[in-house]
Image (cartoon, grey):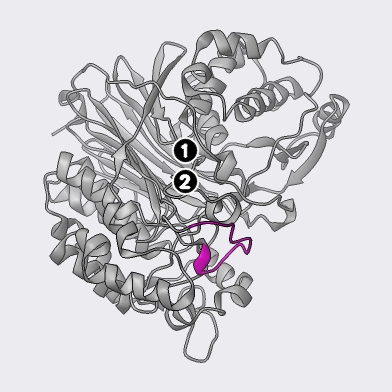
Amino acid sequence: MRLAHLFLAGALFFAACGPVPNSEHGASENPADATQLSVPDPPEVSTETSADPAGRYAQGAEFMVAASTPEAMQAGRNILEEGGNAIDAAAATAFALMVTDPLMSSVGGRAQILIRLAEGTVVGIDGATQAPLRVDEPANLGHGYGTVPIPGAPAALEEMLSGYGTLPLVRVLEPAIRLAEEGFRIKPDVHDALRTYEDLLTLYPGTRAHFYRSDGSPYSEGEVFRQPALARTLRAMAQEGVEALYRGSLADAFVVDMEEHGGLVRHDDLNQYRPKEGEVVQGEYRSHQIVARGGNCDGASVIEMLQILEHFELGMMERDSPRYIHTIAQALYVGLTDEYVPDWMQVSKDHAARRVREIDPNRALPIPVRGGSPEGDTNHLSVVDGQGNAVAITQSIGPSFGSKVASPELGFFYAYSYDMNDEPVPFQREKTSQSPTMVLKDRVPFLVLGSAGSSRIPGSIVRTVVNVIDHDMSLWDAVSSRRWFIAENELRIEATGLSGSTLGALEGMGYDLSYYEGLDGYFARVHAVMVDAGAGLLFGASDPRDFGAAGGR
């Protein structure tokens, strides 16, 4: 059935959010560390069917999935083709990402979820990792068993599925189990990271056993990679429920490994873990409603940045002009420096009006801001079905490969806790830059999106929204256009194609410039779905800075 006949207007549920704890962040980075990617042309798509499953841009009339790997996108699309709803498909996609994107997600990781149900209710689920009870001093190592928190993502996904899905967990896990058993082809980012972090990764026997060949060499790009231990873990979860990880046989293996190697997670830690209701924040931008995850997420920064930019006539500016680049950079910068302001204040239009007065149209603000982890830290998926259900999920295990420790028996990377490494607090859930977001037009979904990229996540979401609303861009153009951010008192910019006069004018405003060639994964990786309810069409886009895909029907 076509989308235009199925979307129904509904009342929104919003929850204001309070103060938040410590932020998920990494050390200062060298811009040269960022992976540089070439920009492919978007594939041709018809008006009736989606693009090839491996394509980054797709069009359809019934449903759409965009995700950080093609295999995970296909897992979600298959569920929708078989009659599941967006919640079922999002769960299948998220579990498949735990298999096909070991750099950024795993069974041991965290997930932040935003759902908009067809009848209009907006729901958040907090699947953050949690520090165990027995943390008493910082690990101060940056990797290892002492940085491993209590997993959150599996419990959050099961909570989502049981509350709003239509299919059982055993069915939703089938694609992930198949991918673990039969394998998938290693992508360039995974191969490169296995080499880059080899000295750390090979310190741990489980990581050596599961992610390197028997001769100790890393798997090559394009090589089929199978994970039989992870397949057994996922199969146990399918048979026993996610309960197996927190209170069953998988929990036993988890705790034994922790006890034998100096980890801190114990049975009582796993047993007490529950996903929480995730706080949802709201705002407005040029007559559109914005809903995003607040609380220990950074959706309030997304809203503040947009509400600051609402004071400028962006559509009247030349997009590569110094004035435009400066205006965007300053708004994103101000919003990011407010990330510890209480959510209720950050999303206030009065607060945005006060902050916009601090922006000098001719000079850069001098205050430095952290750059966040250079590695990106996260992956994202967005799903919309024909009934009007929409889901955005961002997952993470911390920096690339999380703690760098893979469970010898269970076959997945344990997450890394920034708080446990730096400022541990028992049972604390980490503050994160993750910002699942939806833009509603006439109170139905218009944009469903999120991003991977540490502190650049909120700004990349804002840039995509501005490109669509202010510049009337296609979704593909919106996610693949130039980005820039202020970090550590530099203006870091994808500079290819900018004139020398533009760059000189920016330097004259007081910016120290750091140039990136082409489109670079450092600038975050957006995966989005756009709904044209009037035309009955859906568009999906997977950022060309990533190795993902979009597909639908």
Left of 116 or right of it: where is 261?
right
- Residue 187's disc is none
- In the rendered view of the protein, which quadrant contains the C terminus? top left
Query: Residue 359: x, y in percent?
Result: 72, 16
Q: Nearer the viewer, residue 528 or 235?
A: 235
Between disc 2 and disc 1, the foreground one is 1
**Up-down: is 248 above or below 361?**
below
Please, what secondary structure does the residue beneath circle 1 have? helix
N-terminal-most mark, 2 or 1: 2
Q: Work out whether residue 489 can be spotted.
A: yes
Q: Quadrant of residue 92?
A: bottom left
**Up-down: is 446 above or below 126?**
above
- Given contact means CB atoms under 8 Å apart, are the residues at marks 2 and 1 in contact? yes
Left of 322 or right of it: where is 227?
left
- Per the model, the C-alpha gap separating discs 2 and 1 is 7 Å
Residue at the spot x=52%, y=68% of the render?
A: 404
Residue at the spot x=48%, y=86% of the render?
A: 213
Magenta segment includes 136: yes
Q: Which residue is mark 2?
A: 42
Q: Which residue is mark 1?
A: 476
Mark 1 surroundings within 10 Å by alpha-carbon count, few (fewer than 14), some (14 through 19), many (20 or more): many
**Furthest-bottom residue in view?**
215
Mark 2 surroundings within 10 Å by alpha-carbon count, few (fewer than 14), some (14 through 19), many (20 or more): some
**Up-down: is 239 above or below 182?**
above
Magenta segment includes 527: no
Segment tinted magenta in the rendering: 135-146
Left of 547 or right of it: where is 486?
right
